[in-house]
Amino acid sequence: EANPWLKEQKVVAKPDQLIKRRGKAGLIAVNKTFSEAKDWVMERMCKEQKVETVTGQLTHFLIEPMVPHKQEEEFYICLHSLRYYDEILFYHEGGVDVGDVDAKAERLQIPTGVELTAGMVTEKLLGKVPMGKQANLASFVLSLYKFYKDLHFAYLEINPLVMLEDNTVVPLDMAAKLDETAGFLCAQRWGEVDWPPPFGRAAYPEEALIRDMDGKTGASLKLTILNDKGRVWTMVAGGGAS
């Protein structure tokens, strides 16, 4: 009832657990009714799933609207931060088979303190994009970079980024990393953020307890158990606790 669109249009279902290359692993259900998507999710819920070399339980899924589009409308974009500059990688062909973007993507480096402009984006990144799409896509990249900086992301990848025939931009899949040390600046804007363990590694009860305590205090409380049978305990940061 809260989401009537679920029964009014076709949907896409997929796990939401820090899993990359879900399409190649057969973990995306496309063009389904809500009932079909629900059945697909329940068949996999809490089941063991091997993704490349990692095996884990599937426990969290997304169901979202289906966006019909053509292959040539898919793009790839990635923003990440290095020591002295941010870098944007863009490729004019996105999707499951995007391949080695590090080797073939266009790159734009933005040194600290330099303001990004639409002209820079168009010249450095959008040379292989149809002319009719360049202005709107450049505007989107500018807005995305502002969003990236304002909320202190360290990494943000959208694949595919779809631009429809009417130049509407739709991010279909995204992976991102927040700079946790910016919590004192952005905590209210981030909202309630969960910091889940990687896929294939369930949190130990002790880790879950410390994470819950961390969310209720202004102090920083972290615990990662590397070897639950280990007898040597290291403290990688003091901060008064040592």
Image (cartoon, rainbow, N blue to C red):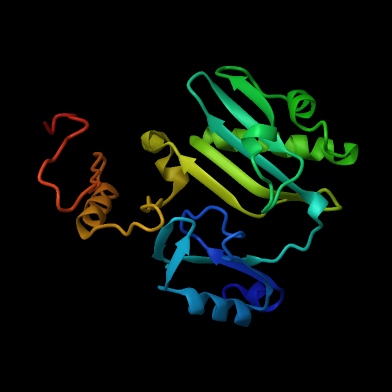
Residue in the picture at 16% in, 36% down: 234
Q: Position of residue 49 (x, y in %)?
A: 45, 67
Quadrant of the image containing the N terminus: bottom right
162, above or below 42, in the image: above
The answer to which of 21 and 41 lies nearer the viewer is 21
The quadrant of the rendering that contains the C terminus is top left
- Vertical relation: 38 (above or below) 233: below
Q: Where residue 187 sits: x, y (%)?
A: 40, 42
Frontmost residue, 188 versus 57:
57
Residue located 50% across and 66% down the image: 61
Q: Is residue 151 visible?
A: no
Of all residues, the one furthest to the front in this rendering is 53
Residue 157 screen position, x and y as percent: 59, 43
Residue at position x 38%, y 38% from top? 180
Q: Is residue 129 left or right of residue 232?
A: right
Q: Position of residue 25 (x, y in %)?
A: 56, 62
Which residue lies at the image location 36% right of the left edge and 53% below the top edge?
197
Q: Compared with residue 235, is residue 226 higher up or lower down, i.e. above or below?
A: below
Question: Position of 40 compared to 206: left or right?
Answer: right
Residue 233, by quadrant, is: top left
Q: Is residue 25 above or below residue 242?
A: below
Q: For residue 94, say whether it is visible.
A: yes
Would residue 15 appear left or right of 118 to someone viewing this image?
left
